[in-house]
Amino acid sequence: QRPLHLYLSPSPRRRRQHGAAAAALRPSAMGDLLSLCVGGAFDSESAELLSLRKGFALSRKKDLTLGLGLASGSETCIVALDRGDTMLTWRALKGGGDDGGMPMSRIGRIVPEGEKGVSVLNKQGKREVEFTAQTPHERDEWLHAMQTVLMEGAGASPKVSE
């Protein structure tokens, strides 16, 4: 790994070269130079992307057709990005559940619902899927990760409503 050098303040020689403006700056007690390794945490994939690849345990709201009408239920899923980071997928923890996914490019808006819920809307504003986290903190962490990854990915950020 090659070090990346960031100058915190000019050295005495540089202050003389750059005149009065640089003379007002004094070297820090730590010295003039801070080295960071390229290839380390600063240029690696974001923590948000890594957490979405790993997945979040969320409950997915689903509608059940019972012949006479509709009833709602939920199932606990692992919600994660696929290997290519192009699909938001959900996989039921218990067998027999409904696995599914949605292309990240179709996500138009992410809407928090109450303290622990979130709805994912497509670009036309239609609700595609609803999730519920176990805690408000987990929901907020998932929302932040999704917003960050979507902004980094397609270049256009979906709206996250408050």
Image (tube, rainbow, N blue to C red):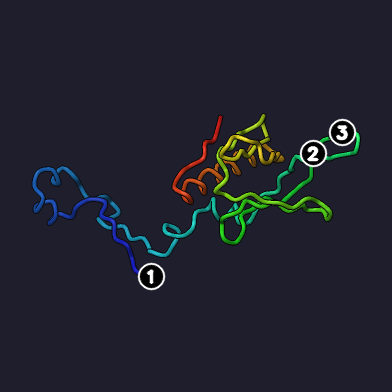
Between the C-alphas of marks 3 and 2, the distance is 10 Å
Task: Report the residue at 60% width, 52% height from top.
Answer: 52
Q: Position of residue 134 (x, y in %)?
A: 72, 40
Please state, as top left, top right, bottom left or bottom right, where the C terminus lies in the image.
top right
Which of the two residues, 92 or 3, is positioned nearer the viewer here? 92
Position of 11 compared to 28: left or right? left
Q: Position of residue 107 (x, y in %)?
A: 57, 43
Task: Report the residue at 33% width, 65% height from top.
Answer: 3
Q: Give the number of the disc on residue 63.
A: 2
Vertical arrangement, residue 138 with respect to residue 80, above or below: above
Please state, as top left, top right, bottom left or bottom right, where the N terminus lies in the image.
bottom left
Check disc 1 and report its element: helix, strand or loop. loop
The picture quadrant where one finds residue 40 is bottom left
Which of the two residues, 120 or 19, is positioned nearer the viewer here? 120
Q: Residues within 10 Å of mark 1 (few under 14, many from 20)?
A: few
Between the C-alphas of marks 1 and 3, the distance is 62 Å
Q: Residues within 10 Å of mark 2 (few under 14, many from 20)?
A: few
Instruction: Name the residue carrying label 1.
Output: 1
Task: Report the residue at 78% width, 50% height from top.
Answer: 98
Position of 4 compared to 59: left or right? left
Outermost residue on the bottom side: it is: 1
Q: Give the number of the disc on residue 69.
A: 3
Which of the two residues, 41 or 29, is positioned nearer the viewer here? 41
